[in-house]
Amino acid sequence: MAERTETFEILESPIHAAKIKVIGVGGAGGNAVEHMINRKVTGIEYYCANTDAQALGLLSVTNKFQLGSKITRGLGAGADPDVGRAAALEDREQIAEILQGADMVFIAAGMGGGTGTGAAPVIAEVARDMGVLTVAVVNRPFPFEQRKRISVAEKGVLDLARHVDSLIIVPNAKLLEVLPPDTTIIKAFEAANDVLHDAVKGISDIITKPGHINVDFADVKTVMSKRGMAMMGTGIASRDDSNPGGAAARAAISSPLLENIDISSAGGILINVSGGEHLTLSDLTAVGEVTREVCDLDDDMLISGMVVDPELGDKVQVTLVATGLWGKAFQTDGLEEAGSEQSPRDEQTRDPQRPGRRPSVQGGAGAGMRQGARDQEKARDLRGKSTERQREAASAEPVALDRAKAKKAGNEGPPNLDYLDIPAFLRWNVD
């Protein structure tokens, strides 16, 4: 009897790497993206969106798109969030096209201006409606900036909070506590960009960098979908410390640049432990022990990854992201007053068909259609206002910042940044 030979062929499934996109919205968001590109953060697709065509033209990023060309004619939002929102609504389809295929999107923006404050929530809403994991990383104004700008920023944070899975807020006021008194304005804003960079890189590295202990994107999505404020901290310790893993973890938890938030209330925590060739499992164990001291979570809500990075030498670096937090800057009462949607904290009234996603809107589908009609009507009104404002600007005497006074103010007190509320098309004439 002839011997039968069987051949087996192993069919490999195509590997789907998580696709991460970063969209910088407005001037501050664009600067943040430029900073990330210069710092060589890889494994990410970068985009910049702005109503200011000139500001877009100055960026080196390949993928950039102008928002609301009909409304603003490329001249910026004039520090008006309503104009920024209308501009994003005008290009809603283009935004959806850019987000196509993304598994996760970071939205980087500065709160307090027109485009970042107004357009970022629209982009976030489009992303979440497409099922994309949406994380916003934004900064608040410095204390020396105008009260109006600070007030606009607070409202913008509340609006953005309703449309993202996680929101990381970097208050620039914290930078003043850790930077030397003689730090220049340029260096201060660079430091703010460093924090935005660290937040995006810390999370994306957990997903994109292969490690000895890998973290699945599904795990990251589970933790980052815990709606609310998120805290990101990074800590570094050397082998000179008797417990470098624990020391780095404590430094990450007590990061001075982020809001004073008690992470014991976190809904989930992501941890990435990096180090040189001397990195040990005991380092990872120590990190876990320190984390559990301050936050008792189920195992599936505490996700840890471990990566060997020779560039770190004898140092241990811990990046910790705590999600589902509710701090002073993120009051649910404020959210309820800011709009008709339910507070993200109201778990009982979410759409049961989309667990963990956007809270349901009061009033059902009819209310949604009416809201859409109101948005379109508002956009038409704003288009008219924008045209009128540009007409007035053509005959108006440009308002200039007295550079000599500003220099003097730098020695005797905080600089006058009132010019930030002057529309871009006026500032160009000044410069």
Image (cartoon, helix red, strand yellow):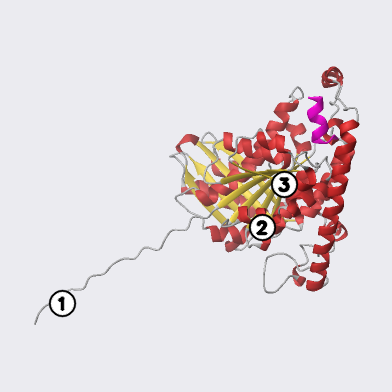
The answer to whether marks 2 and 3 mark residues whose Cβ atoms lie closer than 8 Å is no
Q: Residues within 10 Å of mark 1 (few under 14, many from 20)?
A: few
**Residue 24 occupies quadrant:** top right
The rendered magenta stretch, by its main secondary structure, is classed as helix
Q: What residue do we see at 64% from left, 62% from top?
A: 130
- Magenta includes 427? yes
Q: Position of residue 40 (x, y in %)?
A: 54, 37
Q: Please tell me how crowded label 2 is: few (under 14), some (14-19), or many (20+) other residues with Cα within 10 Å.
A: many
Q: Secondary structure at mark 1?
A: loop
At 82% across and 58% down in the image, what residue appears? 375
Q: Residue at x 77, y 71 (%)?
A: 349
Query: Horizontal and vertical percent for residue 399?
Result: 88, 27
Task: Find disc 2 in the rendering and name its residue.
Answer: 127
Q: Indicate the amino acid at tag 2.
A: Ala
**Residue 208 in the image: x percent, y percent?**
51, 49
Q: Marks 1 and 3, how far apart in space?
A: 67 Å
| Amino acid found under the numbered disc labelled 1 | Arg
Magenta span of residues: 422-431
Tell me the amino acid under the disc marked 3: Leu
Mark 1 and mark 3 lie on one chain; the one further toward the N terminus is 1
Numbered circle sitting on residue 67: 3
The quarter of the displayed image where residue 415 is located: top right
| Relative height, residue 29 to residue 206 (above, below) | above
Who is closer to the viewer here, 131 or 296? 131
